[in-house]
Amino acid sequence: MKEYRDHYFRKAKEEHYPARSVYKLKELDVKFRLLRPGMLVLDLGAAPGSWSLGATEKVGNKGLVLACDIQATSTTFPPQVIFMREDVFNRSAAFEACLRELGPFDLIMSDMAPSTTGSRFTDQTRSLELATEAFSLATTRLKQGGAFVVKIFMGPDIQDLLAPMRRAFDTVKIFKPKSSRAESKETFFVGLDFFQE
Protein backbone atom coordinates (compact mmCIF):
# COMPACT_ATOMS: atom_id res chain seq x y z
CA MET A 1 0.00 0.00 0.00
CA LYS A 2 2.79 2.41 0.92
CA GLU A 3 4.53 1.73 -2.40
CA TYR A 4 1.26 2.41 -4.23
CA ARG A 5 0.83 5.77 -2.49
CA ASP A 6 4.45 6.71 -3.04
CA HIS A 7 4.16 6.05 -6.78
CA TYR A 8 1.81 9.01 -7.29
CA PHE A 9 3.69 11.18 -4.82
CA ARG A 10 6.97 10.58 -6.69
CA LYS A 11 5.28 11.01 -10.07
CA ALA A 12 3.89 14.40 -9.00
CA LYS A 13 7.35 15.54 -7.90
CA GLU A 14 8.95 14.32 -11.13
CA GLU A 15 6.31 16.03 -13.28
CA HIS A 16 6.40 19.26 -11.22
CA TYR A 17 2.87 19.20 -9.82
CA PRO A 18 2.35 20.49 -6.27
CA ALA A 19 0.24 17.44 -5.29
CA ARG A 20 -0.64 13.92 -6.39
CA SER A 21 -4.30 14.89 -6.77
CA VAL A 22 -3.68 15.91 -10.40
CA TYR A 23 -3.78 12.24 -11.39
CA LYS A 24 -7.36 11.96 -10.13
CA LEU A 25 -8.36 14.75 -12.51
CA LYS A 26 -6.44 13.13 -15.35
CA GLU A 27 -8.28 9.84 -14.75
CA LEU A 28 -11.62 11.65 -14.60
CA ASP A 29 -10.79 13.42 -17.86
CA VAL A 30 -9.84 10.20 -19.63
CA LYS A 31 -13.03 8.51 -18.44
CA PHE A 32 -15.50 11.35 -19.08
CA ARG A 33 -13.72 13.64 -21.61
CA LEU A 34 -14.23 16.68 -19.43
CA LEU A 35 -11.56 19.05 -20.75
CA ARG A 36 -11.09 20.51 -24.22
CA PRO A 37 -9.13 23.43 -25.72
CA GLY A 38 -10.66 26.86 -25.16
CA MET A 39 -12.85 25.86 -22.21
CA LEU A 40 -13.76 28.09 -19.29
CA VAL A 41 -13.29 26.19 -16.02
CA LEU A 42 -14.10 26.98 -12.40
CA ASP A 43 -11.87 25.10 -9.93
CA LEU A 44 -13.20 25.07 -6.34
CA GLY A 45 -10.83 23.98 -3.57
CA ALA A 46 -7.91 24.57 -5.90
CA ALA A 47 -4.95 24.81 -3.49
CA PRO A 48 -2.19 23.87 -3.84
CA GLY A 49 -3.01 24.06 -7.55
CA SER A 50 -2.56 20.67 -9.18
CA TRP A 51 -6.06 20.52 -10.68
CA SER A 52 -5.75 24.03 -12.09
CA LEU A 53 -2.38 23.15 -13.66
CA GLY A 54 -3.75 19.90 -15.05
CA ALA A 55 -6.77 21.70 -16.49
CA THR A 56 -4.69 24.40 -18.18
CA GLU A 57 -2.72 21.73 -20.04
CA LYS A 58 -5.96 20.73 -21.75
CA VAL A 59 -7.76 24.09 -22.16
CA GLY A 60 -4.63 25.69 -23.61
CA ASN A 61 -3.86 29.35 -24.25
CA LYS A 62 -7.41 30.14 -25.38
CA GLY A 63 -8.96 28.62 -22.27
CA LEU A 64 -9.20 30.02 -18.74
CA VAL A 65 -9.32 28.56 -15.24
CA LEU A 66 -10.78 30.56 -12.37
CA ALA A 67 -9.42 28.89 -9.25
CA CYS A 68 -10.27 29.53 -5.62
CA ASP A 69 -9.50 28.09 -2.22
CA ILE A 70 -9.86 29.13 1.41
CA GLN A 71 -6.10 28.56 1.70
CA ALA A 72 -3.36 30.48 -0.05
CA THR A 73 -0.94 28.71 -2.38
CA SER A 74 2.66 29.38 -3.38
CA THR A 75 2.20 27.66 -6.76
CA THR A 76 3.18 29.75 -9.77
CA PHE A 77 0.35 29.54 -12.29
CA PRO A 78 0.41 30.16 -16.03
CA PRO A 79 -1.35 33.32 -17.27
CA GLN A 80 -4.60 31.51 -18.07
CA VAL A 81 -5.21 30.78 -14.36
CA ILE A 82 -6.79 33.37 -12.06
CA PHE A 83 -6.39 32.31 -8.41
CA MET A 84 -8.47 33.95 -5.69
CA ARG A 85 -8.47 33.20 -1.97
CA GLU A 86 -12.14 32.61 -1.15
CA ASP A 87 -14.43 30.88 1.31
CA VAL A 88 -17.08 29.15 -0.80
CA PHE A 89 -19.67 29.71 1.96
CA ASN A 90 -18.86 33.42 2.25
CA ARG A 91 -17.88 34.55 -1.23
CA SER A 92 -16.57 38.07 -1.69
CA ALA A 93 -18.21 40.66 -3.92
CA ALA A 94 -15.06 40.63 -6.07
CA PHE A 95 -15.32 36.88 -6.63
CA GLU A 96 -19.04 37.07 -7.43
CA ALA A 97 -18.28 39.84 -9.93
CA CYS A 98 -15.60 37.65 -11.50
CA LEU A 99 -18.06 34.75 -11.80
CA ARG A 100 -20.59 36.99 -13.55
CA GLU A 101 -18.01 38.56 -15.85
CA LEU A 102 -16.32 35.33 -16.93
CA GLY A 103 -19.18 32.84 -16.83
CA PRO A 104 -21.10 30.80 -17.61
CA PHE A 105 -18.56 27.98 -17.30
CA ASP A 106 -18.07 24.85 -19.41
CA LEU A 107 -16.86 22.84 -16.42
CA ILE A 108 -17.10 23.37 -12.68
CA MET A 109 -14.91 21.05 -10.63
CA SER A 110 -14.57 20.76 -6.88
CA ASP A 111 -11.84 18.92 -5.03
CA MET A 112 -12.88 20.62 -1.78
CA ALA A 113 -12.52 18.58 1.39
CA PRO A 114 -13.14 19.46 5.03
CA SER A 115 -10.42 19.54 7.66
CA THR A 116 -10.79 16.02 8.96
CA THR A 117 -11.66 15.47 12.63
CA GLY A 118 -11.23 11.71 12.91
CA SER A 119 -14.99 11.33 13.30
CA ARG A 120 -16.26 9.61 10.16
CA PHE A 121 -19.79 10.98 10.63
CA THR A 122 -18.59 14.57 11.13
CA ASP A 123 -16.18 14.40 8.21
CA GLN A 124 -18.82 12.95 5.88
CA THR A 125 -21.38 15.58 6.95
CA ARG A 126 -18.93 18.41 6.30
CA SER A 127 -17.90 16.90 2.98
CA LEU A 128 -21.57 16.78 1.93
CA GLU A 129 -22.01 20.44 2.93
CA LEU A 130 -19.06 21.45 0.71
CA ALA A 131 -20.24 19.29 -2.19
CA THR A 132 -23.78 20.65 -1.91
CA GLU A 133 -22.51 24.23 -1.98
CA ALA A 134 -20.40 23.42 -5.06
CA PHE A 135 -23.49 21.94 -6.73
CA SER A 136 -25.52 25.02 -5.84
CA LEU A 137 -22.89 27.18 -7.51
CA ALA A 138 -22.87 24.88 -10.53
CA THR A 139 -26.63 25.24 -11.04
CA THR A 140 -26.25 29.02 -11.39
CA ARG A 141 -22.89 29.25 -13.19
CA LEU A 142 -22.76 26.34 -15.67
CA LYS A 143 -23.47 26.62 -19.37
CA GLN A 144 -26.25 24.51 -20.85
CA GLY A 145 -24.58 21.18 -21.63
CA GLY A 146 -21.77 21.86 -19.14
CA ALA A 147 -20.18 19.37 -16.75
CA PHE A 148 -19.71 19.22 -12.98
CA VAL A 149 -17.26 17.12 -10.96
CA VAL A 150 -17.35 17.05 -7.18
CA LYS A 151 -15.46 15.15 -4.50
CA ILE A 152 -17.47 13.69 -1.64
CA PHE A 153 -16.75 11.40 1.30
CA MET A 154 -19.11 8.46 0.93
CA GLY A 155 -21.72 8.11 3.66
CA PRO A 156 -25.41 7.49 4.32
CA ASP A 157 -26.56 10.91 3.10
CA ILE A 158 -25.12 10.89 -0.44
CA GLN A 159 -28.63 10.78 -1.94
CA ASP A 160 -29.05 14.35 -0.65
CA LEU A 161 -26.64 15.32 -3.43
CA LEU A 162 -27.19 12.57 -6.00
CA ALA A 163 -30.95 13.13 -6.27
CA PRO A 164 -30.78 16.85 -7.19
CA MET A 165 -27.81 16.19 -9.48
CA ARG A 166 -29.88 13.63 -11.40
CA ARG A 167 -32.56 16.28 -11.90
CA ALA A 168 -30.04 18.81 -13.24
CA PHE A 169 -27.84 16.64 -15.49
CA ASP A 170 -28.65 14.24 -18.28
CA THR A 171 -26.10 11.75 -16.94
CA VAL A 172 -24.67 11.33 -13.42
CA LYS A 173 -21.83 8.91 -12.70
CA ILE A 174 -19.95 7.83 -9.57
CA PHE A 175 -16.22 7.25 -10.04
CA LYS A 176 -13.30 6.48 -7.73
CA PRO A 177 -9.95 7.03 -9.50
CA LYS A 178 -7.18 4.45 -9.11
CA SER A 179 -4.95 7.26 -7.83
CA SER A 180 -7.24 7.77 -4.82
CA ARG A 181 -5.88 6.07 -1.73
CA ALA A 182 -7.60 2.72 -1.26
CA GLU A 183 -8.48 3.51 2.36
CA SER A 184 -9.93 6.91 1.49
CA LYS A 185 -13.70 7.38 1.65
CA GLU A 186 -13.52 9.94 -1.14
CA THR A 187 -15.18 9.43 -4.46
CA PHE A 188 -16.32 11.71 -7.26
CA PHE A 189 -19.78 12.44 -8.61
CA VAL A 190 -19.76 13.51 -12.26
CA GLY A 191 -22.67 15.37 -13.85
CA LEU A 192 -22.70 15.56 -17.65
CA ASP A 193 -24.91 17.65 -19.96
CA PHE A 194 -26.35 20.22 -17.57
CA PHE A 195 -29.82 21.48 -18.34
CA GLN A 196 -31.94 24.12 -16.62
CA GLU A 197 -35.16 22.73 -15.19
Image (tube, rainbow, N blue to C red):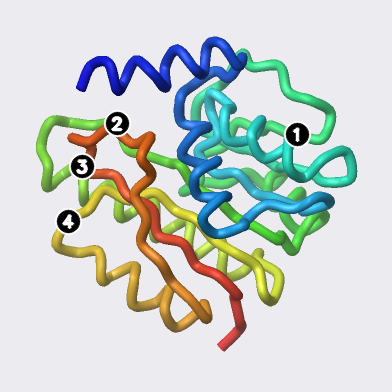
Q: Specify whether 55 is left or right of 45.
A: right
Instruction: Please name the residue that numbered disc 1 is placed on.
Output: 81
User: Is disc 2 placed on a helix, strand or loop?
Assistant: loop
Q: Amino acid at mark 2?
A: Ser
> Label 4, label 1: how many angstroms apart (C-alpha)?
33 Å
Q: Quadrant of residue 104?
A: bottom right
Q: Give the crowd class for mark 4: few <14, some 14-19, many >=20 residues within 10 Å.
A: some
Q: Residue furthest bottom?
A: 197
Instruction: Please name the residue that numbered disc 4 is placed on.
Output: 155
User: Is disc 4 placed on a helix, strand or loop?
Assistant: loop
Q: Specify whether 75 is left or right of 22.
A: right
Q: Nearer the viewer, mark 4 or mark 2?
A: 4
Work out whether 103 lies above or below 139: above
Q: Give the crowd class for mark 2: few <14, some 14-19, many >=20 residues within 10 Å.
A: few
Q: Amino acid at mark 3?
A: Asp
Q: Residue at x 46, y 48 (%)?
A: 89
> Label 4, label 2: how many angstroms apart (C-alpha)?
17 Å
Check residue 123 in the rendering and tell me which mark sits there, or answer none: 3
Quarter placement of the N terminus: top left
Instruction: Please name the residue that numbered disc 2 is placed on.
Output: 115
Whichever of labels 2 and 3 marks the residue nearer the N terminus, that label is 2
